[in-house]
Amino acid sequence: MTTEIIIQAIVTGLMMGLIYALIAAGLSLIFGLMEIVNFAHGEHLMLSMFSSFWLWSLFGLDPLFSIPITILLLAFCGIITHYFLIRYILKAKMLIQICATFGLSIFIRSIAQLLWTPDFRNVDKPLLEGRIEIGSVFIGQPQLYASLVCLLAFFGLYWFVTKTETGLALQATAQDRHAAEILGIPSNKMFAIGWAIGLGCVGVAGGMMANYFFIFTDVGINFALFAFVAVALGGFGSIIGCLYAGIIIGLVESLGGLLIDPSFKLLYVFAIYLLVVIYKPQGLFGRY
Amino acid sequence: MKILTVENLSKSFGGIQANRDISFDVEEGSILGVIGPNGAGKSTLFDLITGFTKADTGKVKFFDKDIFGMSPDKISNLGVGRTFQKLKPFADQTLLENVMIGAFVKEKDIKRARDRALEIIDFVDLIEKRHHFAKELSTGQRKRLEMARAMAIDPKLLLMDEVTGGVDQKTIPGLVELVKKLKKTGVTIITIEHNINIIMEISDNVLALDQGKRIALGEPKEIQNNKQVIDAYLGTFDAA
């Protein structure tokens, strides 16, 4: 095995990891804010990929340009999810909360299958195509741009949460909603904003992945599972933890596939999850 | 002018009547002390006034505005601040950020909110700790933080739940001085206190509760000599 192959695997893992990181950040933000796990996160990712696909297929809009629309659609989807489902289960028992978002995932996937059939689709000839070659390492352009855009979005999110007025209010609500309310911060509005941002992240990731990934109704399942692992590894509620965790998962997946056996890629990732749960349940940066 | 008018406020949890028919009003610029044995319904009364718990019946007016049934954030936005008995600092954020979050209610510009927060932190004598995380502060400092945060919303009325509870004897005088200093700024204060000496020292009026009912309301001296109060509270206090 040559060094080039290992470098290739590291680059591939890094690029994938940044996408996992952003998807996980959305999940983590929602959990950190209201302690509800969005089990429909993968389905929301699927919706964002389909949004990109249909905007391309119906209006000829390249996924690169439809990104803002996809983000807005998903953010809107987040607000709707909060107002029509989540706010009714905020005080409910955990099992009910799990069933609600898990039920939502089945609902969205079934509707998608009904409307769009389970066929595999892809965007034909997107603007981002081809690959660049550095030495003997190949980097797919769509993958490269997807990971860069995700990284940019990630830092945008981090800046928003830590440096803006709304971000501080979100953090305050996450830490103690009653203390935040007494300072005049409406928690219900903050939760809706949290959902909008959480799904907006998925909008960025899905929109960029539509450039090179097959688009089908079950596409989100594995991504969501990886996002759960990333959130557990990074620490529930920690956004910056997702970045490290996403990258670790991307690298483990890609290097494990190269060095051991590619057919067990999922196994390596979930082995991390088990190790975290057993040895460091609060994750790398967690506050729970 | 009356800043707060409470009429016949009642709340029961299951079979327990936490507040029954409580009525009182508070004069603008004064300090009302609320006393009563454990379980008398003092914190519940605060919860009802600030909207955290919905009262069963009654009326609550802030100046002329009916605030009964309003959500806590709306009541806060009108100018009603509160501190909690069980402190609720935003532990993972710095002292400055904690106070800034409150300051944003009145001031949307980050820089100005920051300046205002610094002024308030200086007022509560914590300026050197401004970049410390809230979780690094001592209990006495957290009490000051909680007051600073409540002040950041620029309240006209401030409800304080046991400012001197849970801190050591040496810390108490400083906190009492802070409450007096706060009163001088013109804020109306309602304070729950277990320490009778403090309540008598700082209050203009005292409201005594027992088993969810109002048993007396008046100037500190009257309350001290009120037989019902002595039976319910001071009697046990003296005995202990």
Image: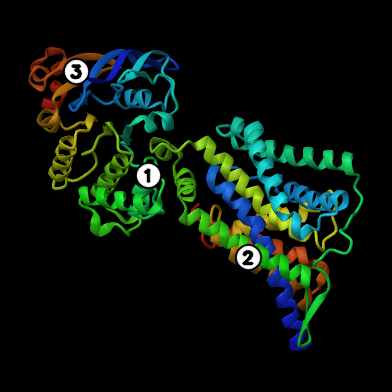
Question: How far is disc 1 from disc 2 in space, using C-alphas?
Answer: 32 Å
Element type where label 3 sits in the image: helix
Q: Nearer the viewer, mark 1 or mark 2?
A: 1
Asked whether the residues under marks 1 and 2 belong to the same chain, the reply is no
State which tag comes first along the sequence, 1 or 3.
Answer: 1
Q: Nearer the viewer, residue A97 or A270?
A: A97
Q: Nearer the viewer, residue A211 or A214?
A: A211
Q: Position of residue B173 (x, y in %)?
A: 12, 43
Question: How far is disc 2 from disc 3 in space, using C-alphas?
Answer: 64 Å
Q: Amino acid at mark 1?
A: Glu
Element type where label 2 sits in the image: helix
Q: Which residue is mark 3?
A: B232
Q: Is residue A59 above or below residue B147?
A: below
Q: Position of residue B55 (x, y in %)?
A: 41, 18
Q: Chain of mark 3?
A: B
Q: Chain of mark 1?
A: B
The quadrant where residue B86 appears:
top left
Q: Position of residue A281 (x, y in %)?
A: 56, 57
Q: Amino acid at mark 2?
A: Leu
Q: Nearer the viewer, mark 2 or mark 3?
A: 2
User: Residue B107 — which label?
Assistant: 1
x 66%, y 39%: residue: A98
User: Residue A151 — which label?
Assistant: 2
Q: Callout 2: 10 Å neighbours few (<14), some, many (20+)?
A: many
Q: Position of residue A44 (x, y in %)?
A: 73, 47
x 40%, y 52%: residue: B110
x 24%, y 17%: residue: B25
x 20%, y 31%: residue: B194
